[in-house]
Image (cartoon, rainbow, N blue to C red):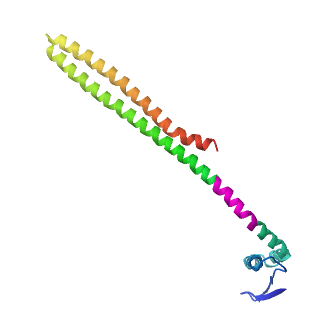
Amino acid sequence: MAETKKSSSNRSVKRAMPAKAATPAADLLASDVQNTMLEAAEPVMPATVQAVVQAVKPEAMLDAVHMVAEATPQVMRHVAKRTEESREVLRAAMQEAATASTRGALEVNDKMIEAFRAQSDAAFDLWQSTLRAGSLPEAVQLQTAGLRNAYETATAQWQDIAATTKRWFGQSVEPIQAVWTNR
């Protein structure tokens, strides 16, 4: 039940043929696996590895092949189901992140436009009041007070924009973080 084949190094290698199997394809697969193992092991550790491979019973290999063949569809269905569930959860998280990002970007954009508008209005009012001043000292006082007021207003607006931007980025990443931390 074994055939002998000459290898490239002129050594004879015993090829095991399965004794009895349920299907010819399984016989062929078990035989091919064993022969491939023998060929791969030959140059590295010829005697020891070949002895181990030949000691493996073809029936045991065939049983393992049958067990894998029977379990594969069930495993693949389970993997497909888990993959689909993960895909749906990730898709929902990405959609939620995109929505939060859009909302945050619009909010920051509105605040920036409002800040620019308020600053330009304050500058226009400052120049009007300066030009209407009755004396030079009064104009300098109005200019100084107006600049201080514009600086304080701009600082508060930009701090608000920075806080809004921070919140925007946090809310945009939150749904994706939740998916990865819940795994």
134 lies left or right of 33:
left
* Residue range highlighted in magenta: 68-81
Q: Position of residue 139 (x, y in %)?
A: 18, 14
How many numbered callouts? 0
Q: Within the image, what quadrant is residue 178 found in?
A: top right
61 lies left or right of 148:
right
**Relative to the observer, which residue lies in front, 52 or 144?**
52
On screen, 163 above or below 15? above
**Relative to the observer, which residue lies in front, 6 or 178?**
178
Asked whether 71 falls inside the magenta stretch, the response is yes
Q: Give the quadrant of the N terminus.
A: bottom right
144 lies left or right of 99:
left
The answer, for residue 152, to whether it is visible in the render is yes
Q: Within the image, what quadrant is residue 25 found in?
A: bottom right
Asked whether 86 falls inside the magenta stretch, the response is no
Q: Give the quadrant of the C terminus.
A: top right
Q: Position of residue 104 (x, y in %)?
A: 43, 35
**Relative to the observer, which residue lies in front, 128 or 95?**
95
**Relative to the observer, which residue lies in front, 15 or 99?**
99
User: Residue sitting at 29 percent across and 29 percent down?
Assistant: 116
Q: Position of residue 75 (x, y in %)?
A: 70, 59
Q: Within the image, what quadrant is residue 148 found in?
A: top left
Predominant SS of the magenta segment: helix
The answer, for residue 56, to whether it is visible in the render is no
On screen, 151 above or below 33? above
113 lies left or right of 37:
left
User: Residue sitting at 35 percent across and 32 percent down?
Assistant: 110
On screen, 76 above or below 62? above
